[in-house]
Image (tube, helix red, strand yellow):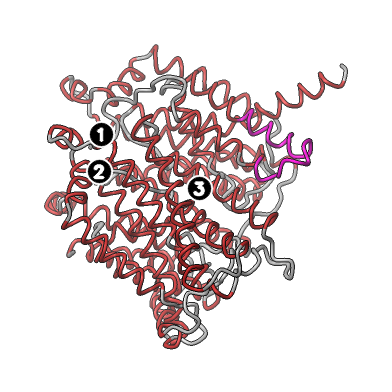
Amino acid sequence: MDETQIVILVFVLGTLKSATPLVFASLGGLVSERSGVIQIALEGFMLMGALWGAIIAYETHSAWLGLLASCTASILLAWIYAYFVIQLKADQIITGTAINIFAVGIAPLITKVIFSSTGSTPNLDTVARFHTAPLFLAIFFVILVQYWFFKTRSGLIIRFAGEDPQILTASGISVTRVRWYALTACGFFCGLGGASLSLFLASSYSPIMTAGRGFVALAALIFGKWKPLPAVFACILFAAVDALQIRLQGVFPLIPVQFIQILPYVVTVIALAGFFGESPAPKAIGKR
Amino acid sequence: MKKSFLGLIIGILISALLASFAGENPFHTIQVLFESAFGSSYDMGLTLFYATSYIFTGLSVAIAFHAGLFNIGAEGQLTMGVLAASWIGVLLPNLPYPLSTLVAILAALIFGAIWGFIPGWLRAYRKSHEVIVTMMLNFIAAGLANYVVLNLIKNPNTQNPESAPVGQNYHLLSHDFIQNLFTDSPANFSFIIAILVALLIHFVLDKTVFGFELKASGANEEAAHMSGIESKKFRMLAMTISGMLASLVALNEVLGSAHRFRIGFSVDYGFVGIAVALLARNNPLGIIFSGLLFGVLQKGASDLDIETEFITRDFGKVIQAILILSITVFYFSDLERIKKWMKRKS
């Protein structure tokens, strides 16, 4: 291989790697929003997942136990969210924001109690980290969700909960219950996303390491018109901008580094501006 | 107001409970919190200082709420405002006194307005969801401010990440009566301005046609459209005004106290503004009081960090989140349903 091929290969691998948490988060957002529940708490779920994933992986020296802990933490937080928006019918956007603020605030307390540090967890050794697994998990779950959503009865039920919940009620299916399941799945995917952040992309938990990825994933979801495969491609696109951003930092010394760093966010806004066509949301989304 | 208050009490109780899980005496926690907020005139000054910015961001979030929009971009908007004011102050240090402050405020308002207009326009005419756009704009604002402060107007005399100080003429008042009351604290005349702005917004929303149409476009877009109100225009305007209100934090920060852009100056003013607005049920006059309350919480939480073993300054965020949740539940859902539900459980 000559040098340009290596550069391209490194770039592609870097893109896929940084796309992994985005893909998981957008799958989580997809399941939640297609069931009719607005989901802006992806950020908070992932952050809790990343934190507990790193803690348990550090204590047990097992990346897989870390992953399990990450999913558990994220699902628990998703259940708190579900309790507020489904049972108490609280405003979904406000509740989601509160969950995000809560996650950012509680994380330092947890690290302080466990590690007496107000920020990061200690570095993980190589056996406690993932090297490729989350990438393959992501591919597996994307195919699974695509199949589940469009080829199975339960997938259809979830889509109906978001488009026309009255029909479900009329046919004797509890919309409340469907949404609880959907939010559990959302928490699970965000847990996978969080674990890929702290155990795959990085080698420890650091404060606010989600860095807006929950929102970028949501933008990818809208960009992909709330469909699994297009949303995943949007995630890869955003990840490519991010990988490009990291590569560009040393290349053009004349362009200030801050301008290159904000590139992914600028691209997200432009994508959201809908210069690529209309993107209709699920009809019953946010209806309480 | 009763419902909000009930939510507030329950929120504080849950927070204290959470503190006790971390091994802290909840009564001690609450005691430290209040002592730290009101202990001395310096402490009270700091509380007032935080409250001033919270009132501005609370008003910012509230006016967007009235138009049916959720502005989580106050953080970016105030960053742009503070950036504009300090940039002008460093570039033109010798403008004569009243003119200098006016120019700085105007610059802040323009930057804030732009940062509100972008998501407003995108929402009204491109149907882009304002929550994601404003969140992205928060990151972009932070990046831009970082660049300008550290590359263009950096303070050469310090290692701290901050801009050079603005000219003497930009100081709001060299010794205003608020500063005299709370010696050495950053409290300043901006507090009075914040109250005046709250009164102004109250007047505009309640007593003018503009305010009525703005609220109508938020309450029911279709009905507003039927009666000839262009709700698109009002959403855009509301978001722009929201950005301008957030940018007024520059008064408190640049003209009133620090006289420069300090990277990381904002203790999440923009996000706390959401809780401030919710607690006051988006009522501008109520925001004065809820802004003060969150000032107390912010000041208290920063001292909990020192006074307790496990509680960090970020614990303030936990309290905010729990308050937002409990207030939302009590305020937006009808109490009868909760009572019925609680009866069924017991």
Is the residue A188 above or below the residue A225 in the image?
below
- The residue lying at 65 percent from left, 42 percent from top is A259
Given the current orientation, which residue lies at the most extreme top position? A151
Between B231 and A2, the one lying in front of the other is B231
Amino acid under disc 3: Asn
Depth check, mark 1 against mark 3: the one in front is: 3
Is residue B231 located in the magenta-colored stretch of the structure? no
Q: Do the residues under discs 1 and 3 have CB atoms within 8 angstroms?
A: no
Where's residue B282, x and y in %?
Answer: 26, 57
Q: Name the residue under label 2.
A: A87
Amino acid under disc 1: Thr
Label 2: few (<14), some (14–19) or many (≥20) C-alpha neighbours in 10 Å: few
Q: What stretch is highlighted in magenta?
A: A239-259
Q: Mark 1 points at which residue?
A: A176
Asked if residue A188 can be seen in this view, the reply is yes
Where's residue A14, x and y in %?
Answer: 70, 29
Task: State whether the magenta stretch is mostly helix, strand or loop.
Answer: helix
Q: Mark 3 points at which residue?
A: B138
Q: Do the residues under discs 2 and 3 have CB atoms within 8 angstroms?
A: no
Given the current orientation, which residue lies at the most extreme right position? A2
Depth check, mark 2 against mark 3: the one in front is: 3
Q: Are both tags, 1 and 3, on one chain?
A: no
Judge left or right: residue A54 versus residue B314.
Answer: right
Asked if residue A80 can be seen in this view, the reply is no
Between A287 and A238, the one lying in front of the other is A238
Looking at the image, tell me whether mark 1 or mark 2 is earlier in sequence order. 2
